């Protein structure tokens, strides 16, 4: 039980078991714009040279797409591997910490003091000494609780939050590598591992902005657990500290005047202008207390909290929350400088407190983010709280039970029970993520008075073809927030699909009155006008949509359809080509392009695009039929028969395909 290889194996098994029901969880919410609809991921060449503040995270998604397309299983496997590796890195981090100069001195001093039984009536065995079992089991239970804690589900099961777990992996690898290099006595090994640590820090900075605190944590760790010549230690830290420049430079670039750069950096450090910095900070005092509660008692987890914004420091909830947090931070400072034997474990506890506050500071300070609370933001900070909980458990049990073996057994049983309970809760929480409806129904049930939850639940019903239920949720969202523009837009979509085009136009127009620059509303309003036979008005709104957002593929595709309906086939082809340059995998654009080429008598080109479309979507019955028509036109009757038969297998009610097939078979029989 005290062998490290067994510990690593146990961490892997627990991590796999608690997330074994997530491999078929679909894409959710922000997965759509970042992965499903992010056409830059379709081509690996777009990932080089490195650009953007989250380049490395997007590179991993591009690799997922390259090897498995949009099959969610591959994305979940990678997410789970990252999570399990993070738990192993947490284990390694604690093991390395016990080898630092501070703990060697502390444990020796503690052991010497326990021998002075004539002056000390009873002194518990040092919880981090080999005699107590602390060095063997503390890393294990810290890693197991990290792997199994329910709060991690959002960072692991929610595919797009790989940004968080991947940045954490690189963060931990950099810190552990730094510690290992400092402990090494061989120069070649030391500098090789240091290079790995530095490279990991750079990649972390290019994965997610939470990595900005990494140099602070490394410097804190250096001065808490190491010793030596101050000048040499600072020189050793400088390369790591310089990596902090990567994140701001990723936002502003290096070729701008200093004044413009400062202005852009200030803008980048404020995701939303709806929440003032001071109000965001006050709100975060309350949010952080909620985070601590979720880590200690992970119940009523929610994807989309309805959290109030606080504007006054003298609000009792804000003031009491700040007081509570200051007491914890003051305790961290006290533990850092405590020297009594009974507090020799205090520096590790102090490090856990500082870790929690420092790693949370990027997203819970004065940088306003539209959503003031999200559970995935606890993924990295949770390590600090888990360190505190497990360390205190060992210390308290060894203080209460004087027999070392019994105290160790009791401690391990309690922590094992916690791991089992957390694992069950995590597994159950992952069931909620099984589809859009279950996830957002859970969110709305726990948070019925937030418009966004009802709107997204409406989208979930809409995607399942449950239009009436979708309309009901959109209407609830509008009752909660009458200016919720997305709900008006979605109502327009639902009514359009129900054939109520005039009502759809009305809701699109309301959305555009609220925001005249809503590109998607212009595009879909164009579709509604087209359905009413108003081609010129449709073209006008498609063009407006593209002036606002030149990346809307549907608008290019619809413009092509409109121009083809007006007999302008060459212009139609031009717009289809633009749509396919943006996304070569757009099935509708390939079909429409093929139809246009077919109208122009360019049958070979038409066949080429039908074949591409069917490679992307083999179950498209109309495309099989159209390809059959093209083959028939070229005299390839056997190929035409095959395509008509496939179309009928996919859609037995496809009368045109049936008639075409009967006609060819009759011709062949007559011969």
Image (cartoon, rainbow, N blue to C red):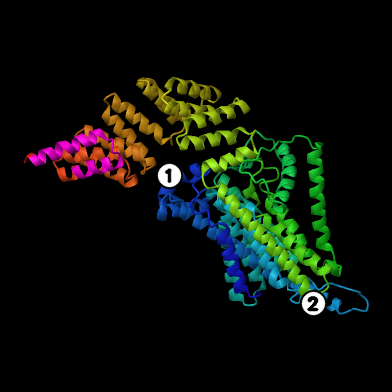
Q: Mark 2 points at which residue?
A: 108
Examine the rendered structure and indicate whether residue 569 appears above or below residue 53. above
Total marks drawn? 2
Does 451 sit left or right of 70 as displayed? right
Please rate how many residues cluster around mark 1, counting C-alpha atoms within 10 Å: few if below 14, some from 14 to 19, many from 20: some
Q: Can residue 543 be seen in this view?
A: no
Quadrant of the rendering where the N terminus is positioned:
bottom right
* Real-space Cα separation, disc 2 to disc 1, in angstroms: 59 Å
- The span picked out in magenta is 641-669
Q: Can residue 216 be seen in this view?
A: yes
Q: Mark 1 points at which residue?
A: 39
Q: SS class of the residue under badge 1?
A: helix
Does 185 sit left or right of 55 as displayed? right
Residue drawn at the location 23% of the way across and 33% of the way down: 656
Find residue 255 and report its horizontal and vertical position in percent: 54, 46
Quadrant of the rendering where the C terminus is positioned:
top left
Mark 2 vs 1: CB contact within 8 A:
no
**Upstream in sequence: badge 2 or badge 1:** 1
Find residue 261 and report its horizontal and vertical position in percent: 60, 42
Find residue 575 and report its horizontal and vertical position in percent: 34, 33
Examine the rendered structure and indicate whether residue 93 appears above or below residue 35. below
Examine the rendered structure and indicate whether residue 417 appears above or below residue 210. below
Residue 172 lies within the magenta run: no
């Amino acid at each position: 039980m005290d062998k490290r290889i067994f510990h690593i194996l146990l961490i892997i098994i627990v991590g796999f078991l608690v997330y074994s029901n997530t491999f078929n969880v679909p894409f959710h919410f922000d997965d759509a714009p970042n992965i499903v609809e992010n056409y830059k991921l379709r081509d690996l060449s777009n990932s080089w040279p490195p650009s953007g503040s989250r380049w490395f995270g997007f590179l991993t998604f591009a690799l997922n797409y390259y090897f498995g397309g949009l099959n969610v299983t591959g994305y979940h496997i990678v997410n789970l591997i990252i999570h399990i590796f993070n738990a192993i890195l947490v284990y390694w981090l604690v093991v390395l910490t016990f080898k630092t100069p501070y703990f060697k001195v502390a444990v020796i001093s503690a052991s010497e003091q326990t021998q002075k039984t004539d002056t000390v009536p009873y002194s518990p065995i040092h919880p981090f000494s080999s005699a107590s079992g602390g060095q063997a089991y503390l890393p294990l239970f810290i890693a197991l609780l990290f792997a199994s804690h329910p709060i991690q589900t959002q960072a692991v099961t929610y595919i797009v939050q790989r940004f968080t777990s991947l940045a954490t992996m690189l963060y931990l690898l950099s810190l552990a590598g730094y510690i290992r290099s400092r402990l090494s006595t061989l120069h070649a090994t030391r500098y090789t591992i240091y290079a790995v640590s530095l490279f990991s820090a750079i990649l972390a900075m290019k994965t997610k902005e939470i990595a900005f605190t990494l140099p602070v944590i490394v410097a804190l760790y250096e001065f808490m657990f190491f010793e030596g010549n101050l000048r040499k230690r600072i020189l050793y830290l400088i390369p790591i500290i310089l990596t902090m420049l990567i994140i701001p430079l990723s936002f502003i670039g290096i070729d701008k005047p200093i004044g413009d750069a400062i202005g852009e950096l200030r803008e980048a450090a404020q995701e939303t202008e709806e929440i003032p910095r001071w109000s965001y900070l006050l709100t975060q005092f309350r949010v952080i207390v909620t985070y601590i509660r979720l880590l200690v008692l992970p119940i009523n987890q929610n994807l989309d909290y309805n959290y109030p914004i606080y504007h006054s420091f003298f609000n009792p909830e804000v003031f009491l929350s700040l007081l509570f947090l200051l007491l914890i931070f003051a305790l961290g400072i006290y533990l850092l400088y405590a020297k009594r034997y009974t507090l020799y474990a205090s520096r590790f506890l102090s490090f856990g407190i500082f870790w929690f506050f420092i790693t949370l500071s990027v997203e819970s300070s004065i940088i306003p983010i539209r959503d003031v609370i999200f559970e995935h933001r606890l993924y990295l900070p949770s390590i600090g709280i888990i360190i505190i909980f497990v360390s205190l458990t060992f210390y308290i049990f060894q203080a209460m039970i004087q027999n070392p073996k019994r105290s160790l057994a009791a401690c391990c049983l309690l922590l094992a029970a916690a791991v089992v309970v957390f694992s069950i809760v995590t597994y159950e929480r992952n069931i909620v993520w099984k589809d859009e409806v279950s996830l957002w129904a859970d969110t709305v049930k726990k948070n019925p008075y937030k418009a966004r939850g009802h709107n997204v639940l409406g989208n979930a019903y809409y995607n399942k073809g449950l239009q009436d239920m979708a309309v009901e949720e959109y209407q609830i969202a509008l009752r909660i927030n009458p200016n919720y523009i997305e709900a008006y837009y979605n109502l327009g979509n639902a009514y359009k699909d129900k054939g109520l085009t005039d009502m759809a136009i009305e809701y699109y127009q309301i959305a555009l009155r609220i925001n005249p620059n809503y590109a998607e509303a212009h595009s879909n309003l164009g579709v509604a006008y087209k359905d009413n036979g108003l081609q010129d008005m449709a073209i006008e709104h498609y063009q407006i949509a593209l002036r606002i957002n030149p990346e809307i593929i549907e608008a290019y595709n619809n413009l092509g359809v409109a121009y083809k309906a007006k007999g302008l086939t060459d212009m139609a082809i031009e717009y289809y080509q633009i749509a396919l340059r943006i996304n070569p995998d757009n099935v509708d654009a390939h079909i429409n392009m093929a139809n246009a080429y077919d109208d122009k008598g360019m049958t070979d080109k038409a066949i080429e695009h039908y074949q591409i479309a069917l490679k992307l979507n083999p179950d498209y019955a109309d495309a099989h039929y159209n390809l059959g028509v093209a083959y028939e036109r070229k005299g390839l009757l056997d190929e035409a028969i095959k395509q008509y038969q496939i179309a009928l297998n996919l859609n037995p009610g496809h009368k045109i395909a049936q008639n075409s097939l009967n006609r060819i078979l009759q011709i062949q029989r007559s011969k």
